[in-house]
Amino acid sequence: MQKKIYKQIIIACSVLIGINVISSVYYARFDLTEDSRYTLSATTQEYVKNLQDTIRFSVYLHGDLPVSFVKMERELTDFLKELKRIGKEHIQIKFFDPRNLGSNAKENREAFARLTQYGLKPYTIQEQDESGTYVQRHIIPGMIMSTSERYVPVNLFADGVASGAEELIFEALGRLEYMCVKGIMQLTTEHKKNIAFLTDHGELPFLYVKDATLSLMELYNIDRITTPELLDSINKYDLVIVAKPQKPFSDEHKFIIDQYLMRNGAFLGFIDAVDVNADTLQYVSNVTAVPFDLHISDLLFHLGVRINPTILLDNQCAKIPLNLAPAGMPPNYQPISWYYFPIVSGTQSHLISQRLSPVKTEFVSSLDTLEGGGKLQKTILLRSSAYARILQAPVQVGFSVLERIRGDYFTSYYVPVAALVEGELESLYQYRATPLSAEQLPKNFTTILKTDSVKMIFVADGDVIKNDVSVRGRDTIAQPLHYYKYFAVDKNVYTGNKEFLLNAVNYLCGDTELISLRSREVAVRMLNRARVLHEKSKWQMFTILLPIVLLGVVGFGVILIRKNKYKKYGS
Amino acid sequence: MVTLFRKEIASFFSSLIGYIVIAVFLLGTGLFLWVFDGELNILQSGYAGLDGLFMIAPWIFLFLAPAISMRFFADESKSGTLELLFTFPISDLSIVLSKFFAGLVLMFIALLPTVLYFITVYALGSPVGNIDIAATIGAYIGLLFLAGVYVAIGTFVSSITDNQIISFIISAALCFALYVGFDFIAEVFPEGVFKRISISLGIAQHYDSISRGVIDTRDIVYFLSVISFFIYITHISLKKKHK
């Protein structure tokens, strides 16, 4: 008898285990969350499924953490578990408490210091200790992703943006998937794509494109080369960037760029059409903006765009401090709208510019795309607000403009300032003599006259890619791209510039999937803080007393029903 | 079967213990979620979601489910009414099922007032109504499956003892073991197959996933398997008493 029971139980167990094993093969998964946040995008799944190496995630956001960070850790864990579910043994996850990495206090400190050397950035929080005094503590909102050969530090918090922990967490959770896929790409890409910054037309020096360069270096090789060097290794580069040229392009250089484009090249140009010496505005009230002659209009015209010698003023603009105190009085700086620094926005017409944060420009020009000219397809990426005005250069630039501005001043609307051009292209030199003689060209060089696909982006302002440089004593420090020197009065952080740059470069280099991951939105739902503060006790009553009262009512009801029943039986 | 089911629910509400059990559940959950400082406090966290409820409920259920199910068979076999039950023209399985479903419905009734929590978060959201309704419903479904497992365990334990207190303690312990015990065992194993199997045997992994609003057929199959297993062995244990 006893034996028979055990036998039955064992059979039942095996049947159930069998069902579970079958169900683990044939299953369906329904993500009920409104934004499908627990579902990895198809791109990510593809990446993780096809992993050859084992990727190890060492997470340092662990240990005794404040509440909001515990929540962040949980979301991070959930996300990594989901990666592991798909990547199986190719994904390994380990958690470390950064305060307990060694066996004693000294070792702990050393281990912590090592983490920062690896590139992890600590975040400082204020905490109350037992005696009630506030102490500072460092936590590490990041992880190290590694294979057996390489590692990349992944800092989950966006750097430099001044905001509270909650906002940083909010942002970090939205970017998790992008950060991880970028990390996997960094670890597993054997041959990085090559990007060249041209340097021989007075383009921005390294220090002024430092943030852009460093951001791009995570995924690409970056070289700074001259145009003749481009000719020597014309097949090497996947993208050429021209950042704010100041000197004319010679015919030879235009030919080299043309031939580079003919070899399925991609091009990103941040080009000023107007020269404004804005620095002198600090000393004089007006300067004259004059058209730049870069000798590049014919090439641009051929490529389907025209950057007009104009200055765009926009009602939606950055602010600068202006001293309103009369002469001789102590300075009184007030923020004023500086219409010369328009804040432009992305259009909905392309992946690059959808969901883009606003982009800050300085003395931007208007840009036209040209009809005809073959089989080029043009898409406007950035444009002004609905209240803009275009001034033809040469024109006076200065504070006096501000006095002239009335309600009806802004007569233009949605003026394009950046465009994507792609498609079939014929060489500019198809019917022209090549400016370089055969001896000047490398051996085996053939002039190509037609290409099926070029991808080019033109921005009518060189400052979009330029980071500020501040001087501290003898040091010059490159600021991040989102930093604006008048933040104190402007109160805005312009993350859109770097987003635009990365989107543009990812697109031009064919890494489109990164764009959609980067701009994927995850809604973090918040309570109304003010109402929570004011109505706290009301809702506490509602949630704690009301259920008990309801229960009491039900109990009372049951008693009444019973009494009635008994009455019925009694009579 | 329906009669038996109704009798079970009615007898729960006719005793003061039933009300006390539910009141303690509601009070405990409420205080943790809305008053006490800490990770679970919804007002402090500032997030518009009921995550705290779904985190704490498995722990509070550890006492609620055994408290509901402890009397099921323990009481009957002590007072001898079990013998009487056997003489009814219904199968043993029907007896087990009616007790199980009565327990599940009682858990559901206990859970019902937490809809007020949902209303609160709905009203306090910024903007109003800023709560993921579908995900919350999914999490509630997960909670019901969890309650099902606990009640099934409780029903079984109640069938092997005739002491309510012992029934309560053993089923609470067994629920706890099934909820997180396998995770503890998994700690012992290094990264690998055994670790994965061990974790997937426990409730925690399946419940965690479903409580976020992700409904996975594998988790559902797991819950249903565990429930059927315990109902089956309750059935066997009852049969044995029958003989």
Image (cartoon, coloured by chain):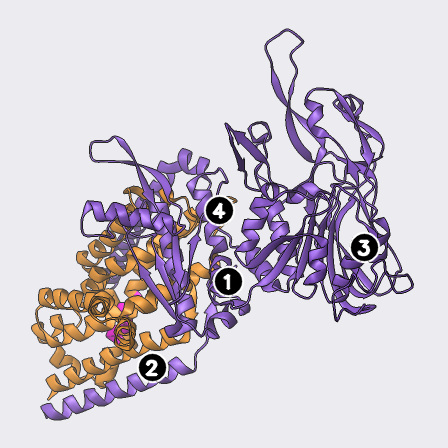
Q: Nearer the viewer, residue A394 or B213?
A: A394
Please state the horizontal and vertical placement of residue A107, each as a whole percent of the image.
22, 49
* Same-chain check, marks 3 and 2: yes
Q: Which mark is residue A36?
A: 1
Residue picked out by circle 3: A252
CA distance separating discs 1 and 3: 53 Å
Type of amino acid at the residue the image marks with label 2: Asn
Dividing the picture into quadrants, the one containing residue A256 is bottom right
Q: Colour of chain B?
A: orange
Letter of the chain that mark 4 sits on in the rendering:
A
Mark 2 falls on what kind of element? Answer: helix
Letter of the chain that mark 3 sits on in the rendering:
A
Q: Nearer the viewer, mark 3 or mark 2?
A: 3
Q: Which residues are magenta?
A: B98-105
Type of amino acid at the residue the image marks with label 1: Ser
CA distance separating discs 4 and 3: 43 Å
Disc 3 packing (10 Å; few <14; some 14–19; many ≥20): some
Q: Earlier in the sequence, mark 2 or mark 1?
A: 2
* Same-chain check, marks 2 and 1: yes
Type of amino acid at the residue the image marks with label 3: Glu
* Same-chain check, marks 1 and 4: yes
Q: Nearer the viewer, mark 1 or mark 4?
A: 4
- Kindly indicate whether the residue at mark 1 contacts the one at mark 2 (C-beta within 8 angstroms): no
Q: Earlier in the sequence, mark 1 or mark 4?
A: 1
